[in-house]
Each structure stands twice: as C-alpha cells, then as structure tokens.
Image (cartoon, grey):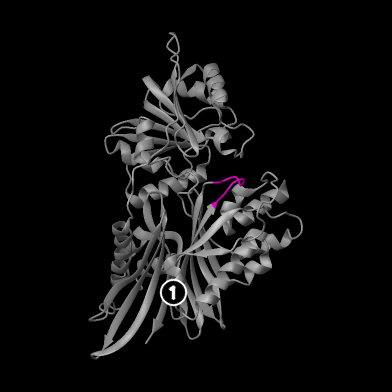
Amino acid sequence: MLLKRLLVAAIALLCPVLLSAQDPPATAGQPQGSPPFVLAPGVQAVSSPEKAAILETLERYFKGYYALDPDILASTLHPEAVNTGGVGQASLTIARMSGPLEQLRKMRGKVKPPVVNAIRTVIDLFIRGDLADAIVREEYLPPMRGAGTTAYHAYQLYKTGGRWLIVSGVLHANQYEGDTDGRTLDMMGVRPGMTIGEIGAGAGRVTFPLARRVGEGGKVYANDIDEQALAELRAVCEKTGTKNIETLVGKVDDPQFPKGALDLAITAIAYHHFDQPVALLKNLAASLKPGATLVILDPAYDRTGEKDSDRPTTRERVEAEAAEAGYELVAMDASLPRENIFILRLKTGGAAAVPKVTTAPYAPARVGDERTAILAAIETWWQGHDTDDAVLLDKVLARGARSWFEHEGTLQFISSATEIERITSGNRRPAGTRPSPGEKRTVVDFTQHSAVAVVTMLVEIPRNAAPGVQSYTTFQLYKADDWWQIVNLAGWVGQ
C-alpha cells in the first residue's frame, strides 16, 4: 500500500492522466510503449532548423512518461523544471519535477508501468531563438480507464548546452468536461437566487459555476471534511472577490448545513467516496426546504467501465440507499458522456414517481475561444509589471507562478511571490523605467485548448531611431477556479 501511495504521489506531478490508466484489462494486441507523434498541418509547416531537435526532446519525454523511467525523463528536463495542473482539476498545483523523479528512482523495478493507448498530436509549435513553445494533444482510447478523455500538454523549452530541455509544463485533462456547463446546470435545476448546499466541494471545481449561476441573490454553502481544500477555496474567493460562497467543515455522516436553508443540495464526483452515505443523507434532510431536491452527479461506471471506487455509483445503489435514507429517485439523466445525474426528493408518503431516464446524446452548447479573457489577464500583468503594482500582479498570477530568462549564459528564475514581496516591501523600480518610450508589444502567437493557453508577445524597444532590441515573452496560462491565471512566463532577447 505504501509503495502504491508513493507511486501515485510521484506520477501525479509528472503525468497525472496515467493515474486513470492503472490496472487496465489485458487485451491482445494492445499498443505498448510510446506511440509516435502526429504533426498537425501548422506544425508540419514550421521550417525552423531546431524543429527536429525539439520534437526529439518531446518524444524522449513521452517515452519516459509512459515507461515511468526517471533517467529518460531527467534527460529531457531542466533541473528547475515544474509541472502544473491535473485531471479535471480546477485548483492549480505548481510543483518541481525533481521530487517525483527521485521517488521514481527509489521505486525502480518495483512498479509496472501502465499500458497506454493514445493518439498524440503536436498541435502547436512556436520557436524564437533559444525559446520554444509546444502543445501536445493526447486522446485516450479503450481499453484504458479514462478512454474518451482529451489531455492537453503545453511546454516551454529552452536550448541550453546545445540541447533543448523542458523548463515548464502545463497539463489539463478534462475528464469531467461538460459537468458544469450551462445545459448541465439546467438539467440539475440550478437557477438564479437559489441557496445551494454542495457536499464534497473540495477546492471548488463545481462550486464556482454554481455560485456564478445563482448570482448575487443566491448563495452556495461549500461543504467538505477536508479543511485544507476549503482553505484553498476561501483563498480563491478572496482573490476573485466572490461573495456568495460560504465554506462549512462537515462530518462524514453530516454535512452540517443550516436547518431548512437549502433549495437544492448537490454532490458532484464525490458520492462514490462517501463512507456513510445513508447516514449523511438522513442528516441532510433537515436542511432541505419543502420540495427541495438532492442532485447526485457521479461517474457513469456502467458506461465507461472505469472503477476508482469499491462502491461505484450505480442506479441500483442510489435507489437502495436513497430509500433507506427516506428519499425517492424521481429522475435520472444519462446523456452526459461520462457521468450520470440522479435527482432525488424526500418521500412524501404517496406513490413514488417512475424515474425518468434520459439517454439522448449530450450536446453541450458551443463555446468559442476565450481570447478576450486571456489577453485581458496578460494586459493586467503588463500593467502591474509596468507600474510595480502588486495588487494587479497578484490578481492574475497563480500561486507558485514564476518567470525565467537567460542572463549571462544561464537561466534565471524569479518566483512571482518574491517579486510581489519586493514590491510590497517598498523596493520599487524607479518611476518611468517601464515601459520604455516607444516600446511596442505585439501578440505573435496565440493558442488556447480547453483550460490551457500559451501566448507569445514580441516586445520591440527602439534605440535612437534604430531597430533596437527585440524580445519575446511567452505566457503559459491555466483556467482554474473559473478564471485565467498566469502560471509561467519565459523571456528571450534577441537583436
């Protein structure tokens, strides 16, 4: 058990999607190892002489990624490399990769790498001097757990010592895509002005969409037994100015919501982890207003074949536990790609309604790219950078974010926390040193896929009417807790 926990801790920071690939069923002829890259047309058209070397670094990284080989991984990573994001997460985790590599070395020969079946496509590659950005899309195929999940990896690379190394990576694997979009909230009956109790809110992946939907006239009580997760949720509320979320530390058998307060209770991607579901539902009843509903949204194990719990949330289980707790199942929706929605009410003493089961294909509303929001975050950063405004910088920088650049032949790293501390301590740059007179900034590369975005800007600084200095600043962003946050910045200066 300890070995397994160490393995999970290590690969969660290096390659989180592989957590959903553990113990796949044996299948004859199933692909093994690292499948080759497919190059999108735009990447095929890149003519840089550095292209082959960059792709070779990425190929080696994924070879080590799938094999859980720390030596191969280390050969592709800068010693200060960090990774960000995870599977279906809203809250960010930015962590150095050196720790997980050491864990993998300690477990060498004691763990069997998972079998991975996926199509990997390099969908964006931007190269300027010794700096490069690359985005890889992975589409996971049966019989893997997590089949149907699309993962996006964004990498910043730098050429040092004659070879390209990965300096930072951002991963988003939206295993639960669609479970909080507008149509799903409609299906769950979430309306403006409601008071909602969320059981198992964690750090707020579902909480913030609920709060946005109920609006200023509504309220969301976010419950969890994990006080640290709720502390993270409160920190995000403070940073984003969210006023209609209140956190409550609950018990395994009692969510501790106020009595008679809730128009709706919801638990999302959590019910299969509950230790005492019947007792919890019984204690929830006193918090529900007359006619209020309870919504359970949980992985559809019956359709996906996944199993990360000894007590998967099937319809039969929900009906049995609901009946024991005094509820009845009044509706079920099975149209989401990977989840089922169960809607329950307290029994009224009359005949139970026949549960309605919806199985029509899920058709989420089309959502365009979020270019405006992403560029607004970057513009806020520039304003904070130009004026040494710690408030503006803190507004758009993720905790653990950093910037890096080459200086005197080596890479230099500055944590955003250190920069903000410098400003708040009164150690400010002289007024007028930024921006330089006539400085021009132009977006020369923009790409956004799901919750990951990479934007590169050309910064031109004229010198006495001469062309002057041209530099590039690359921003890696991640949409977490319902807003775009800058997680890494990279700079390259040319002439």
Q: Nearer the viewer, residue 185 or 198?
A: 185
Asked if one can make out residue 429 in the rendered structure from this viewpoint, the answer is no
Question: Quick one: 97 or 319, which is closer to the camera?
Answer: 319
Q: Position of residue 339 (x, y in %)?
A: 49, 36
Q: Is residue 63 visible?
A: yes
Residue topped by disc 1: 46
Q: Residues within 10 Å of mark 1 (few under 14, many from 20)?
A: some
Q: Secondary structure at mark 1?
A: loop
Q: Indicate the position of residue 31 as horizontal and vertical percent values.
A: 65, 55
Q: Residue furthest right?
A: 109
Amino acid type at circle 1 is: Val
Q: Tell me the residue at 62%/45% (across/down).
A: 143
In the rendered view, does 322 fall on the left or right side of 185? right
- Residue at image location 50% in from the left, 76% down from the top: 51
Q: Which residues are magenta?
A: 140-147
Query: Eyeballing the image, is 342 above or below 163?
Result: above
Magenta-colored stretch includes residue 481: no
Q: Quadrant of residue 26?
A: top right
Q: Can you say which quadrant of the picture contains the C terminus?
A: bottom left
Say left or right for 407 vs 118.
left
Q: Position of residue 80 (x, y in %)?
A: 55, 70
- Give the main secondary structure, helix, strand or loop, of the magenta stretch: loop
Does 306 sit left or right of 47 as displayed? right
